[in-house]
Image: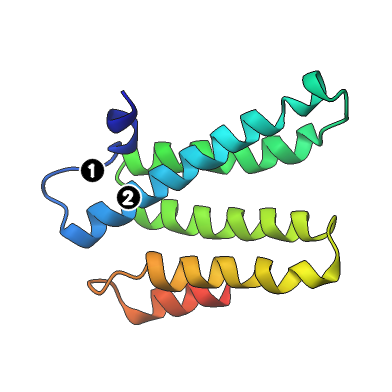
Amino acid sequence: MLQRLLNIGIYNSLDFYQKREVKLLNTLSLFVIVGLLIGSTNIYFLGELYPAIAEGIVALPSILIFFLNWKKKYESAAYTFVISINCAIFFISQYYDRSTDTYLYYFPVIFCVALLHNPNKPRYRSVLFFLI
């Protein structure tokens, strides 16, 4: 079942890089959703308030990515993930010391440039991911 979920939007007609991108986006979106579910257990186990609104705002684009991949809107799924993950990192950085900003900056740079780079797509796409 997990494999089926991760293969949403993957069709035989796609090239290797596009299949890799779709599967990577599905995997990371699932990771975000599971992480948010685990994090929300703070309410029950620790009795601490958890920013449920922020969690919902981050979870919705992650769910939307599965839908966009299923509808073969791969570019929209990639941009949705890049924008949402950067917004989530910006939100998280507000709660931590300034020394963590460097680490929070390099994660999306490495992700966007290295993992989502598709040599079959125009170069401006990678540059735009980098700029976001």
For the residue labelled by badge 2, is the local secondary structure a helix, a strand or a loop?
helix
Q: Amino acid at mark 1?
A: Ile
- Note whether 98 is above or below 92 in the view shown: below
Residue 2 appears in view: yes
Image quadrant containing the C terminus: bottom right
Which quadrant of the rendered structure holds the N terminus?
A: top left
For marks 2 and 1 on the same chain, the one whose residue lies earlier in the sequence: 1
Q: Residue at x 65, y 71 (%)?
A: 105
Between 59 and 45, the one lying in front of the other is 45
Question: Label 2 vs label 1: CA separation?
Answer: 7 Å
The residue that appears at 35% across and 70% down in the rendered structure is 117
Asked whether disc 2 touches disc 1, contact meaning CB atoms under 8 Å apart, the reply is: yes
Specify the quadrant of the image occupied by residue 8. top left
The colour style of the image is rainbow
Query: Which residue is under mark 2?
Result: 22
Q: Which is nearer the eye, 73 or 27? A: 27
Q: Position of residue 79 (x, y in %)?
A: 48, 59
Give x and y (percent) for residue 19: 23, 52
Question: Percent from the top left, x then y, of residue 16?
Answer: 17, 58
In the foreground, 49 or 19 = 49
Image location (x, y in percent) of residue 2 = 34, 28
Of all residues, the one furthest to the top in this rendering is 44
In the picture, measured across the screen, residue 60 lies left or right of residue 110, that is right
Q: What residue is disc 1 on?
A: 10
Q: Residue at (51%, 36%) from the top-left corner?
A: 63
Q: Residue at x 76, y 67 (%)?
A: 100
Give the farthest residue toward the front.
Answer: 46
Amino acid marked by disc 2: Val
One can see residue 73 in this view: no
